[in-house]
Image: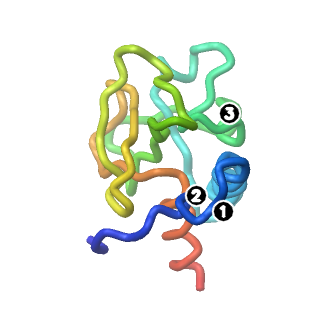
Amino acid sequence: MIGRRSDVLSDYPLAKRLAKEQEDAKYIRDHPESSMSASKASLKRDNNTWAGVAAFAAKHFRPYKSGDKVDFIVCARIDLDHPLYFKDNKFAECIDCRCQLQYRPDVPKGEKICVCCCARRMREETK
C-alpha cells in the first residue's frame, strides 16, 4: 500500500473540483485496462451513475459476477460538494488520500478509493 497521499481536489478551487473529478472519471472509463462492473441490482436502478459522476453511467458497466477480480471499489466522496446519495450508504476513507467516501452496501469486498486517486494511480501505472 502506498502511504497517505495528498487529496488531488485540494489543489483546485471549488468551482473546478467537480470538473476535475469528471475528467478523471472519463479517464478511468476510457482506459484500455479498465473493466468496470456493478451489481445487477444497481444496474437495474433508473438514471443511476456511480461515484456521483455522469461519466460513470450504467451503460458503461457490465454486471459484476462473483469471483470477478476487484482491484478497487471507486466510490463517491461525501463532503460539501458531494451529498449523501442514499440514506443507507456505508462509509469509508480513500486508501490514498483519506477523503471520506460513501458506497452502496452491496459492493463487493475490496479497497475503497476516490475517483481522482484511482485516476492518479492509473496514470502512474501507464507511464
Residue drawn at the location 68% of the way across and 56% of the way down: 20
Mark 1–mark 3 distance (CA, rounded to whole Å): 15 Å
Q: Is residue 69 visible?
A: no
What is the x, y in percent for residue 76?
A: 49, 39
Q: Amino acid at mark 2?
A: Ser
Residue drawn at the location 50% of the way across and 60% of the way down: 118
| Count of numbered labels shown in the rendering | 3
| Near-viewer residue (93 or 72) | 93
Mark 1–mark 2 distance (CA, rounded to whole Å): 5 Å
Q: Secondary structure at mark 3?
A: loop
**Residue linked to disc 1:** 31
Q: Pointer 3: residues within 10 angstroms few (<14), some, or many (20+)?
A: some
Residue drawn at the location 41% of the way across and 35% of the way down: 65
What is the x, y in percent for residue 67?
A: 32, 43
Q: Secondary structure at mark 2?
A: loop
Determine whether 74 is above or below 103 in the image.
below
Left or right for 16, reference 89:
right
**Residue linked to disc 2:** 34
Asked if disc 1 and disc 3 are in contact, CB closer than 8 Å, the reply is no
Q: Amino acid at mark 1?
A: His
What is the x, y in percent for residue 103?
A: 39, 32
**Residue linked to disc 3:** 57
What is the x, y in percent for residue 54?
A: 70, 36
